[in-house]
């Protein structure tokens, strides 16, 4: 795949600092001036990964057997009824190999996500949707090598219960589902539920009502080294900001705090320094120069104070990022239409500046 030829600046730090990325496309903000204050992070590279479908969006990224594996949805448009899950792999993030294309006759495969099982397989989870009349079912699929995939298998969740992302910890799978059916979509009365599984296929309810204030839906779980579990959840209006849940084993009792930004398609991870980094479609709702704008961004998360600080703002406002820490860099996939015409898949490499 090609690197993008024209220069761009990626906005970073506190909303007024910009990082020069020589191989990137011009950002949606146009000509931006570099501030005197430098960010602690810099863009090592930004390149196009894939744009062969009419519409390419909703990414995820893992590092498996010495290669990056990127999955995303292909379709005719954002809600087209025949979405497919495309899987690519790359050793270095520059040359990508087409591994697989998963389809389901008459149904839209949405928001595919990847995880690595304790026995060393790749696992894909996705929602299989028929838009009219609306019907959603959750499916998983497994691969030994990332190239040959088994059948899509329906999990034992109720219809409308979306297996949005799977996180493995101490040999078990955990997920926070969102309930999506015509009634909850019409009334915006979403709630989340915590499940656990031994194999990713058969799930048991751990917390029946995890959170139900102001429409929580897309959620990601991550575990700290001491076993603390964090849940980052998107919410719908009237509460625009995301919420962060915290729990200790056995993860039945949770405390929640609102963050300072809205986040769509939230993803996050802990890097070796102990910092938590968050990515997604961010709306800056506190007073600043970008109040009300939605932008794909990577932020630093302080889980104790419940605060997000902008690290880098990436081109476009697609969000739905995959994140991997590898080779002392943060690798982020996302989709964007900032080059015009259609959504494309991009990979950004971020690294800390030398002190």
Image (cartoon, helix red, strand yellow):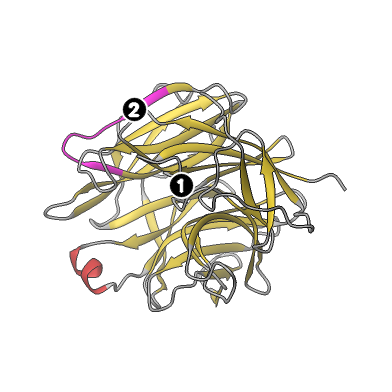
Where residue 208 sits: x, y (%)?
38, 69
Res 128 quadrant in image: top left
Q: Residue at the location (74% across, 57% down)?
A: 35
Report if residue 314 is visible in the image: yes
Where residue 327 sits: x, y (%)?
72, 34
Residue 101, which numbered label? 2
Instruction: Quote the CA–CA distance across marks 1 and 2.
Output: 27 Å
Q: Is residue 246 left or right of residue 336?
A: right
The verdict on residue 101 being magenta is: yes
Report if residue 199 is visible in the image: no
Q: In the rendered structure, which disc, 1 or 2, sits on the residue that comes first in sequence?
A: 2
Residue 151, which numbered label? none
Instruction: Mark 2: give few (<14), some (14-19) or many (20+) Cα within 10 Å.
Output: some
Q: Secondary structure at mark 1?
A: loop
Between marks 1 and 2 in the image, the one whose residue lies nearer the viewer: 2
The verdict on residue 274 being magenta is: no
Res 120 quadrant in image: top right
Where residue 197 sits: x, y (%)?
44, 50
Q: Is residue 321 left or right of residue 58?
A: right
Q: What range of the chain is rendered magenta?
A: 99-109
Q: Residue at the location (46% across, 26% down)?
A: 146
User: Measured along the vertical axis of the image, is residue 188 above or below residue 141?
Assistant: below
Where residue 40 sits: x, y (%)?
77, 53
Judging depth in this view, the residue of 172 and 212 nearest the camera is 212
Q: Residue at the location (40% across, 31% down)?
A: 51
Residue that extends furthest to the right in the rendered view of this protein: 355
Residue at the disc numbered 1: 198
Q: Is residue 127 left or right of residue 107?
A: right
């Amino acid at each position: 795949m090609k690197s993008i030829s024209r220069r761009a600046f990626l906005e970073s730090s506190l909303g007024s600092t910009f990082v020069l990325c020589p191989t990137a496309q011009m950002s949606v903000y146009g000509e931006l001036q570099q501030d005197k204050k430098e960010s602690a992070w810099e863009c090592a590279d930004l390149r196009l990964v894939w744009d062969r479908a009419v519409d390419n969006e909703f990414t995820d990224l893992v590092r498996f057997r010495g290669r990056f594996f990127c999955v995303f949805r292909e379709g005719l448009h954002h809600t087209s009824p025949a979405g497919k899950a495309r899987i690519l792999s790359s050793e270095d993030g520059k040359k990508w190999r087409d591994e697989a294309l998963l389809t389901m006759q008459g149904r839209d495969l949405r928001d595919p996500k990847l995880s690595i099982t304790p026995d060393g397989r790749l696992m894909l989870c996705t929602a299989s949707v028929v838009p009219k009349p609306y019907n959603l079912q959750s499916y998983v699929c497994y691969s030994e090598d990332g190239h040959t995939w088994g059948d899509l298998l329906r999990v034992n969740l109720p219809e409308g219960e979306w297996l949005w992302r799977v996180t493995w910890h101490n040999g078990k799978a955990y997920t926070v589902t969102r309930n999506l059916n015509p009634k909850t979509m019409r009334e915006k009365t979403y709630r989340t539920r915590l499940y656990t599984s031994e194999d990713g296929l058969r799930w048991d309810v751990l917390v029946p009502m995890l959170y139900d204030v102001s429409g929580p839906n897309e959620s990601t779980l991550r575990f700290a080294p001491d076993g603390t579990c964090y849940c980052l959840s998107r919410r719908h209006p009237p509460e625009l900001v995301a919420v962060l849940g915290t729990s200790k084993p056995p993860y039945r009792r949770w405390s929640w705090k609102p963050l300072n930004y809205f986040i769509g398609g939230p993803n996050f991870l802990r890097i070796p320094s102990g910092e938590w980094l968050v990515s997604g479609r961010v709306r800056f709702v506190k007073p600043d120069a970008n109040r009300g704008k939605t932008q794909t961004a990577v932020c630093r998360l302080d889980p104790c104070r419940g605060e997000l600080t902008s690290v880098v703002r990436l081109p476009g406002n697609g969000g739905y990022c995959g994140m991997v820490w590898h080779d002392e860099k943060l690798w982020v996939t996302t989709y964007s239409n900032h080059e015009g015409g259609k959504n494309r898949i991009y990979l950004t490499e971020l690294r800390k500046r030398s002190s």
